[in-house]
Image (spheres, rainbow, N blue to C red):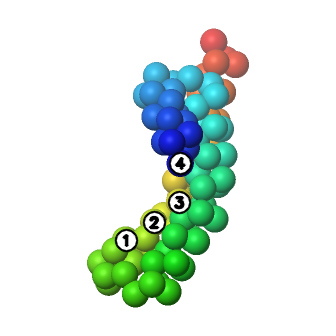
Amino acid sequence: MYLSGLLELACSVGLLTKRRWAGLLSAGLLLGVWPANIDMAVVATKQSKPKWYRAGLWARVPVQLPLIGIALSAWNDVRKTSVSD
């Protein structure tokens, strides 16, 4: 859990500073934690957690798909820029 948080921070810094690796690593990280986020939502539903909590957990599951696309787009943009420079 701490490792994914540290990787998220590193990715955010990398994206802000337009590092070549940041978009690809961000997409991989989002894809890697997606099953865990689904599991958290399922477990919270089975445990009858508060409705607002379950809604938040379920809401982030489909949101990760466009975020993966955005991360790959950022990687592609930086890759194109660094190749043409």
| Residue depicted at x 46% and y 22% | 17
Q: Measured from the top left, where is residue 72 in percent x and y?
A: 62, 44
The residue tagged 3 is 64
Given contact means CB atoms under 8 Å apart, are the residues at marks 4 and 1 in contact? no
| Identity of the residue furthest to the front in this view | 47
- Return the residue at label 2: 60
Q: Which mark is residue 56?
A: 1
Q: Considering only vertical position in the picture, is 74 above or below 42?
A: above
Instruction: Tell me the crowding category of disc 3: few under 14, some 14 to 19, or many 20 or more residues within 10 angstroms, Cα based.
Output: some
At numbered mark 2, what does the secondary structure look like: helix, strand or loop? helix
Q: Is residue 62 visible?
A: no
Residue 1 shows which numbered tag?
4
Tell me how far mark 2 sits from mark 3, CA to CA.
6 Å
Residue at (56% x, 39% y) in the render: 3
- Give the vertical position of 65 relative to 46 (above or below): above
31 sits to left or right of 5: right
Q: Say which label, 3 or 4, has the lower sequence index.
A: 4
Question: Which residue ends up furthest to the top in the rendered image?
Answer: 85
**Residues at marks 2 and 1 touching, judged by CB atoms closer than 8 Å:** yes
Q: Are marks 2 and 3 in contact (CB under 8 Å)?
A: yes
Q: Mark 3: which secondary structure?
A: helix
Between residues 78 and 57, which one lies in front from this camera angle? Answer: 57
Question: Could you tell me the amino acid type at mark 1?
Answer: Gly
- Residue 21 visible at all: yes
For label 4, the SS is: loop
Q: Earlier in the sequence, mark 2 or mark 4?
A: 4
Residues under labels 3 and 4: Cα distance?
18 Å
Task: Say what amino acid the circle numbered 3 marks.
Answer: Gln
